[in-house]
Amino acid sequence: MIEADGLTKRYGDVLAVDHLSFTVTPGKVTGFLGPNGAGKSTTMRMIIGLDSPTAGWARVDGKEYRDLAAPLHSVGALLEARSLHPGRSAANSLWALARTHGLPRRRVSEVLDLVGLSEVAGKRIGTFSLGMGQRLGIAAALLADPSTVMLDEPVNGLDPEGVLWVRTLLKALAAEGRTVFVSSHLMSEMALTAEHLIIIGRGRLIADTTVEEVISGASGSRVRVRSPRAVELATALSNAGAAVDPPGEPDVLHVNGWTAAQVGDLAATAGLALHELVEERASLEEAFMELTGDSVQYHGHTGHDGDAAGLPVGAATTEVAR
């Protein structure tokens, strides 16, 4: 279990994390979401003691990370896959880590096999692709069979097969009763993987709830209707007070603010045939954008020539708190 209470981090004048409190419980995948600069990575760093809180505290299994007798058994973390020495082989890097907790050499082989890197175990990490580096980072996180797994952007750089593998792995770890805490910018993947979400913006808590509740609370729900008499149906719906979007394809209407049952009842009363009636909900991405719209710190603007407006070619912005 991960607990945070009043967790705060300030870098000079920058308040990266602002009195953040939440609990991540075992047995389910909890997604950690927020715009760039929201403070996600800073929060994760404080959980495992890489950064000291300005105020508040974070605990794993009831203890601060520094007080854990064998921390790798309690929490396995992937925060930066490229943190391992590029000149060492994958196997040697994991073996050095394993020795700190008295783990047998066979455990290194087990996790390398689990993440699909057995064939490159002897190769130097510096030659690895981004996706291979992510797999190795996950292997390091799982090395001591921890009860809590915390991963920051684990699917970054992975191909579709790798993304599916991570999704399956996270669900399996949660099903074993572990605490699984994972950040990602891929909303579609979080919708498929996570059961619970903690969403922050500008270092503050925005939502701590289920994926279902986040999506159902969004305002983007609508009803898709297909009818051979779409024009007549649109008129009838509009006269009844429904908001009808212009058809984007032949015979199709999108009705906002009504349920599928209401649309179907009106069509039946009017004697208008329906060939399709589907209640469409907002996606997690749409719900996330709606929740965090006021918390986005870095907005992109495109000029007429496609370059970022107001920035010379090659210019970049610096992100203080991730």
Image (cartoon, rainbow, N blue to C red):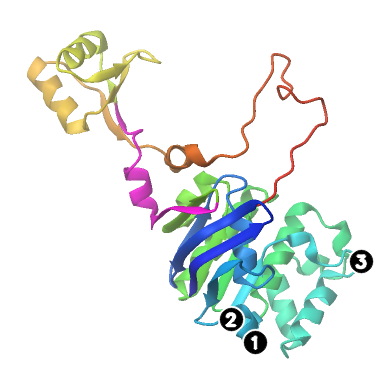
How far is the residue under mark 3 from the one under mark 1?
27 Å
- Please indicate, yes or no, whether residue 198 appears anywhere in the rendered image: yes
Query: Mark on residue 308?
Result: none
Magenta span contains residue 173: no
Identify the residue under disc 1: 70
Vertical order, 54 against 157 (above or below): below
Identify the residue under disc 2: 74
Amino acid found under the numbered disc labelled 2: Ser
Q: Is mark 3 on a helix, strand or loop?
A: loop
How far is the residue under mark 2 from the one under mark 3?
28 Å
Amino acid found under the numbered disc labelled 1: Ala
Amino acid found under the numbered disc labelled 3: Gly
> Which numbered disc, 3 or 1, marks the residue that appears first in the sequence?
1
Q: Are the two marked residues, 1 and 2, in contact with CB atoms closer than 8 angstroms?
A: yes
Identify the residue under disc 3: 87
* Residue bounds of the magenta highlight: 203-223
Please tell me which residue is depicted at 74% across the width and 61% down the height of the picture.
Answer: 81
Pair 3/1: label in front: 1
Magenta span contains residue 214: yes
Single out the residue that lies furthest toward the left.
269
